[in-house]
Amino acid sequence: MTAAVVPVAVGRRPASPRAKARRLARGALALLLVVSGALMLMPVAWVVVQSIELPSDQFNLPPVWFPGHVTLASYRALFSTTPFLENLANSALVTLSVVIGSAVVSVLAAYAFARLQFRGREVLFMLFLAALTIPSQVEAVPEFVVVKYMHLLNTQASLIVPALIQVLGVFILRQHFRTIPQDLDDAARVDGAGHMKILRHVMVPMSWPAISAVMVLTGQYIWNDFFWPNLFITNPNRMTAPLALYYQESSLGGGQIGAIFAGVSLLAVPAVIAFILLQRRLMEGIGFRGVSR
Amino acid sequence: MSLLTDTDRGQAGPAGAGKAVPGGRTGPRGNASFHRLWSGKVGSRQPFAAYLLLSPALMLYLAFIGIPLVGIVLIAFLQWDLISAPHWVGLANFRAVAHDSQLGRSLLNSLLFDLMTTSLHIVLALGLALGVTSIRSRVVRYWVRTAFVAPFLMSAGVVALIWSYALAGATGPFNYYLRDLGLSPPNWLASNTWSLPGLVIVDLWATLGITFIIFLVGLQNVPAELYEAAAIDGAGALARFRRITLPMLSPATFLASVTGCVGAFEIFTWPLIDTNGGPGIATQTIVLYIYRDAFQNYQFGYSAVLSLINVLILVSFLVVMALIAKRWVHYERV
């Protein structure tokens, strides 16, 4: 609508020297942006290239960017000397379980908060919200105690069960459920639907974009998480992939950097690809989740 | 961000009606209600169904958020290595804070890192977002967005591993290319003065994309009419930036500062992997200190006191931010 106004305001003038200078400046800016983007991706490119080089080309200065000979030896070393395949499977298991489990928990809770009347609703919701403002790292010590006394240390469950409550998911979904017209529930109710039916046939289908956005956000957080696995898992076979790389790096020492770089590439490159594929979903929710660093 | 602004829309319907019945004990309860969850008529005032639906979330919240938060306070009064039985030591852990030679430096490290990285985030991301929005080419915009946000999708552990090699003083490519440009860069991760700025480099690389996206969305939400009106009034580019862009971006700036400040104060993975807190304790942040005290020295009681200090600082951050927001953040209802 506003686009129609713009040409009037700007007008079309013959190319003056000023307009020419402006176009030149814009071109220079575009070039600067393209180059800075390339610089951002350079560390990843460096790691990937190192991981497929012969040991004699690896870690040279200046870096060998176009190796004459390509080898998968580093990858073979990674999989033969460390349980990295198992670590990847662990990551997948934990991520899938949390994504599905936390989505169910969040949908149920969000529906109760959005649609049902009960005593203490506002207080409970405020308590949930308060948890959003405090980064989970501050709870490392007491949560470790809880997990230890549940006898979950060194199990996949220690990474799954505590992560099933994603307060952010509850919050986003509750907000979304409230935008769905109440008439739809009422109509379903008249037809004799219970809460579960309303959830299954009204709420979930209508808010699927939000639910899947929450799932993607949760999934990328869990897949990448380093903090909690680092606290709970000490058995190398049960580690998730990022933790396993750190563990192998600090225990193998200098000789096997190629293998570590192979692992880093295996984790970093899919992240870039996933971003390209899931860009729109991620953009919606990216501002919510604090960064875990 | 659009999800956040949905607050309190669509509140029509019987939501308000519930207040007419205090106590909320209407309708049958117990088994009948349980059955009704799946079939039959439902009213919106059904405490039993509500608690049933909430119960998984509530139990998990209690076990892994509520109890740990209260637990910090309790553990702070104990001497406990988690192996032998805990001893109640009263305020001894709190008194020990006065003689702690590492706490001050750790807090200072976290704070310095936080200030450096958050201010750089805001300046660089704002510049980047302004630059990208003024470019018409879709390909360029897509490329920049992908390149800057992609690192955010990597594990913090992977990021730290990449940079522990890339930033290495004599053998890393980062310094190699800086030397190529005629500079004499420090040995970032091993230097007393430069290790913390070194971690800021890592942090910017990995997380600048999010701040960038926050500003990008913020810029898209500035109504074009404002610029048109200003252009008609003959306002120059600088005036438009100061009088329109900056005020209209203040919610985005606020969001970026809050998430940035809180998140950066809790930095852990990069000092752990890249510098191991060193050299000495030059990059030992507060969370790394808590981690070492608990999981390497088994001083769970004292580390709980440190955690409490950490929580207090975060809460005061949030309070200060809320006060600032009241004065400076301009929310436009469009």
Image (cartoon, coloured by chain):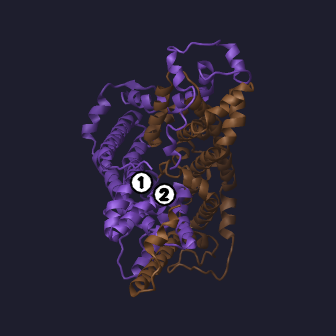
Left or right, A125 with respect to A69, comes to left
User: Residue visible at 49% across and 22% down?
Assistant: A120
What residue is drawn where x is 39% and y is 56%?
Answer: B249
Residue B118 is situated, as x and y percent measured from the top left of the image, at 37, 56
Residue A32: image location, x then y, percent: 46, 77
Q: Left or right: where does residue A233 sit relative to residue B95?
A: right
**First in residue order: circle 2 vs circle 1:** 2
Q: Residue A240 at what x, y percent from top left? A: 61, 49
Task: Check residue B252 in the rendering and tell me which mark sits there, or answer none.
Answer: 1
- Residue B16 higher or lower than B160, as above or below: above
Mark 2 and mark 1: Cα distance apart in space: 8 Å
Report the chain shown in brown: A
Q: Nearer the viewer, residue B32 or A274?
A: B32
Disc number for residue B217: 2
Mark 2–mark 1 CB contact (< 8 Å): yes
**Is residue A186 shown to the viewer in this render?**
yes
How far across and down, in percent of the image, does residue A34 sit?
51, 75
Name the chain letter of the residue that bears numbered label 1. B
State the SS at label 1. Answer: helix
Q: Horizontally, is B20 left or right of B306 in the view? A: right
Quarter-wise, where is residue B44 in the image?
Answer: top right
Q: Which is nearer the eye, A29 or B65?
A: A29
Query: What residue is at 57 percent from the left and 52 percent from the top?
Result: A224
Residue B222 got which mark?
Answer: none
Q: Residues within 10 Å of mark 2 (few under 14, many from 20)?
A: some
Which chain hosts label 2?
B
Q: Quadrant of residue B31?
A: top right
